[in-house]
Image (cartoon, rainbow, N blue to C red):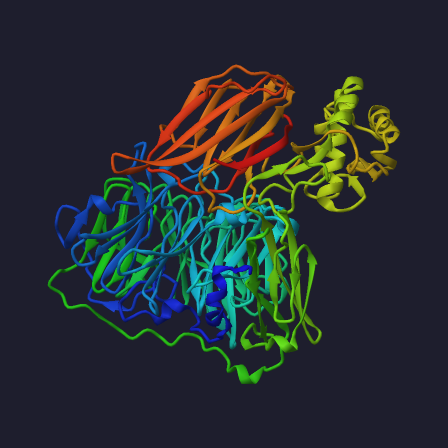
Amino acid sequence: MKRISYVFALMLAVCLGGQAFANDAWKAKPMDWPHWRGPETNGISREKGLVSTWSPDGENLIWSSKDLATRSTPICMNGKLYMLARWNPASEQEGEKIICADAATGKVLWENKFNVFLTDVPDTRVAWSSVVGDPETNRIYALGVCGLFLCVDGETGKTIWQHSMTEEYGLLSTYGGRTNFPVLRGDLVLISAVIVGWGDAARPTHRFIAFDKRNGQPVWNNGTTPLPYDTTYSTPVVSNYKGSPIMVFGSGDGGIHAMQPNTGVSIWSYPISYRGINISPVIAGDNVIAGHSEENIDTSAMGALLALPLGSKGVIKAGGGEAWRDVEYYSGKSSPLVIGDRVYAIDDSGNLAVADVKTGKFIGKKQKLGTQGRGSPVYADGKIYCCEGNGRWYIFELDEATGVKKIHTTRLTGEIDASPIISHGRIYLSTSEMMYCIGNKDAKPSADPRPEPPAEAPVEEDSKATHLQVVPCESLLRSGPKGQAQRHVVRLYNSRGQFLKTVDPKDVQFSVAGIGKVDAQGRFETPTENIHGTAIVTAKVGELTGVTRIRVTPDLPWSFDFSDGVVPASWVGMRYRNIVTDWDLLKKLEEKNETTARLYIYLLSAYVNSGKPITAFDNTTPDQRWTEFLRFVRLLESVKTVDEAKAAIDPMLTALKEEQVVSEWTWEDLGEKGPKLTVKQGARKLTGAGNLVATKITTIPKGTRSFGTMGRHDLSNYTIQSDVNVAQRNGKIGDVGVIAQRYRLDLMGQAQELKIISWISHEIKFKTIKFPWKANTWYTMKLTATSKEKDGKRVAVLNGKVWPREEKEPADWTITWEDEPANEIGSPGLFGNAGDAEVFYDNIKVTAN
């Protein structure tokens, strides 16, 4: 009998519907602060009697704590503070942690500690995000900088469920450290990031994934425009508008978007910048206030503070669709406040400005706070509390004529990335060196009632189903004799994105494309053979359809030789960045002309990644494909006209036509925009060709230096082995590596070193040895990962070796390292840095130790 996946037992909970507040932070007890921007998610507190002055030396200082120093904005719920922070900073044991402390005293009550792995984030940017608290369940949700997403019991600190978002979904964790913030809506907890997934979601896209907050099951997954320039940290604002649930957020694609929070269905989009949007929007009546500090797409002016009509549909045009927009205001980090009929915003240079919420017209002069605007201001008791990145603190009163009037300032030690919060008569502020609790310890806290949140329309007003949702929306299951099954539930929603009902399976038509089978009850079963693959299960109710995506992997051992001509669809973060090429053909072309060989890879990647047999290169779009093409074939300086292009490129295309890589091509003269080259794919097929290898390509706009994972992240105590080859271009050699149990064995080209590491950018947490090696030569890499008990602690034991493929495997390990605390599980994977030249993989094996 097949073993049912663990989530099957939790499906009863998933079948339940239920309505939600406009934002679940509204459910908080009076004076609690369960979201980093407060119970109304807008930076406003209704508390009264708060202090107007204080000093870090004692005046109105209730307590201070170095143990709670962090860059993360805390939350306060049920008398406890919760925050993310560094764990064992600047040590070989460094990681990240969730801290729970007594809000009245600052005493640490518990810590939930976890490792940081497979990320370029530097240690100083750990705890970028903030936790969110669920007033309904007393659970805490946190996203660590490496993509570890946890649900934690707020009373005990025990982890209830977790996801390794990087290994499971392809979350991109970069050197910049920008990490998004979880938000709650009904039974959902939503998180977003730039994700490089699998199958048809392999292209980098800023995506939201909604999980059932009770059991961690993925409910929906949807994204914005593919190939965003940035990762971002704009926290969505969730509310109701004219009875309809809405979620508004800034995206890595340079747009501000609105989605239905229950379904992920897009409502409207506002493309405004070529770079990512980081600040969190604020809803003000019929508009949403937002901003950015990058170049606008419709003008060369940088930055903007703006208002968008909340009831928009489709695409809002930049430079015409706004309610108002003030360009050249660099509102890129600190989120604004809306108080009455005015907007209060801190720009990136640390200036506080006040604007009319209806017109955007600025009021009075900007208040100079310092030089860096980072944290967001909060408002309570007629006062604005705010900070500047270099440690300056301010309190302002509102002023009708000038906007604000400064009533207090002080200077703190350390940097301030966090925002102040307010709870039960106390103001809390985190710096890089201290946590301060500010207030009158003898005062009795009080607050005016919070206003009623915008109401959600009764579902009965719109009972027609327009959207079908299949839950879970994604699964990773085991194939083989010990395979798994997954039952799916179908839900219907109306045009507002409100839940209508769970559909009886007898009223659903289920079908599957790919491997495995699905029965009439929506129960998918994996194949009994030990195979890798994917499946798309489609559910149909009347004219509505919805799908769920399933990856399937067997138990170890695994082997991959790419003889089928494709990178496995079940691998995360690998397709799009990697293609399969014919190594024998590549070498044959290189013997005649190196640039022709690279053009073979360039064109093949264009066909594979677009899924189309024709590709065109011109400068009619912002991505300037013709210019990039010339740069790749090293003709940017020498080719200016169509005739020059033909003379230089036609011989290479002719050589590729002889090999049936291309069949035909055409040239057009677009005048000032230069030539246009259109190339049609030839009849040559990879399947059945010579020696096929996976190739990490240099032609993608993002991700030439990246890794991907192959399957389940709960594997432990195993070995990965791969043949690797790194090309050399312009005297530069890239890097290549294999991954086991969240550790990476790196063969480093320019450094001529061999390295074992888990936290990629950490300055002391790794092992390196000198290791001379050559480009354009096949080597075999092998990494074994195990764990053991040592002096009462869990230690990872890593052994790696590298040798020329044509030689016999050496008996001794080339490099060894013990790491504590150990990563004891993790998905096998591959790493490559193809920024300068291609990286090749072949004959991959993963075996249990």
**Residue 19 percent across, percent down from the top left:** 46, 76
Between residue 796 and residue 656, name the one nearer to us. Answer: 796
Please give the name of the residue rendered at 44% of the width and 75% of the height, measured from the top-left corner: 454
Between residue 349 and residue 440, name the one nearer to us. Answer: 440
**Residue 289 percent across, percent down from the top left:** 48, 61
**Residue 309 percent across, percent down from the top left:** 55, 66
Please give the name of the residue rendered at 65% of the width and 28% of the height, measured from the top-left corner: 838
Whether 88 is drawn above or below 58: the answer is: above
In this rendering, does residue 362 appear at all? Answer: yes
Whether 212 is drawn above or below 708: the answer is: below
In this rendering, does residue 705 appear at all? Answer: no
Q: Can you name the residue that lies furthest to the front here?
A: 1
Q: Can you name the residue that lies furthest to the left here?
A: 442
Between residue 550 and residue 390, name the one nearer to us. Answer: 550
Please give the name of the residue rendered at 27% of the width and 71% of the height, measured from the top-left corner: 30
Whether 456 is drawn above or below 292: the answer is: below
Q: Quadrant of residue 670?
A: top right
**Residue 41 percent across, percent down from the top left:** 39, 63
- Left or right of 55 on screen, residue 504: right
Between residue 709 and residue 482, name the one nearer to us. Answer: 482
Whether 773 is drawn above or below 292: the answer is: above
Quarter holding the N terminus is bottom right
Please give the name of the residue rendered at 42% of the width and 32% of the height, measured from the top-left corner: 761
